[in-house]
Amino acid sequence: MAPFEFGNPSKTLTPWIERYVGYRLGGQPAGLHRGLPSRHPTFIVAIGPPIDVVKQTSRHQDPRTYRAVISGLQASHALIAHEGHQEGVAFEMTPLGFRALFGLPAAELWDLSLELDEVAGSFAGELWQRLQQPAPWPERFA
């Protein structure tokens, strides 16, 4: 099984979402990985254990765990702890899509990470719950 799966959004969503990335990493020793800066604002929903950010991209933000994390662009990497398993869906959003979905420009979250429910309310819990159900990647992407 490949650790990454990619999906394309429907044509109506392509101005806002470039693609979906499903990841499933397991059988590894517990450790840290770097969440690298990207050209996309961050929007990741964890499947299973939450995302344990032990070092944020900004020294002004404390470590935190997230079921679903959003952030603007970042200039440095975050450190994410895991117990040998990580799974989730990353949404590679455009800046316009970030604004359309969350109601604020990605620049407002420059170098800052938030739990999705802080911005999206009950939508966040519903999305997280739906993605916890076992399903093939294409169904999760839909």
Image (cartoon, rainbow, N blue to C red):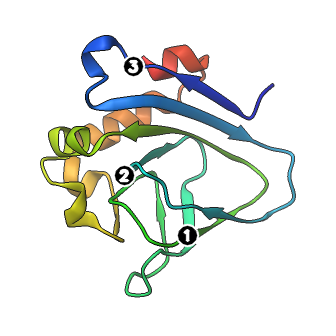
- Label pair 2/3, CB-CB below 8 angstroms: no
Instruction: Provide the residue designation for mark 2.
Output: 41
The residue drawn where x is 45% and y is 28% is 19
Quick one: 72 or 102, which is closer to the camera? Answer: 72
> SS of the residue at dot 1?
loop
Instruction: Provide the residue designation for mark 1.
Output: 77
- Label pair 3/1, CB-CB below 8 angstroms: no
Q: Which of disc 3 and disc 2 is earlier in sequence?
A: 3
Gap between marks 1 and 2, in whole Å? 13 Å
The residue positioned farthest toward the bottom in the image shown: 60
Q: Which of disc 2 and disc 1 is earlier in sequence?
A: 2
Residue 126 percent location from the top left of the image: 32, 34
Crowd tier of the residue under label 2, counting other residues whose Cα lies within 10 Å: few below 14, some 14–19, many 20 or above: many
The residue positioned farthest toward the front in the image shown: 39
Which quarter shows the C terminus? top left
Q: Which of disc 1 and disc 3 is earlier in sequence?
A: 3
Gap between marks 3 and 1, in whole Å? 27 Å
> SS of the residue at dot 3?
loop
On screen, residue 88 above or below 108: above
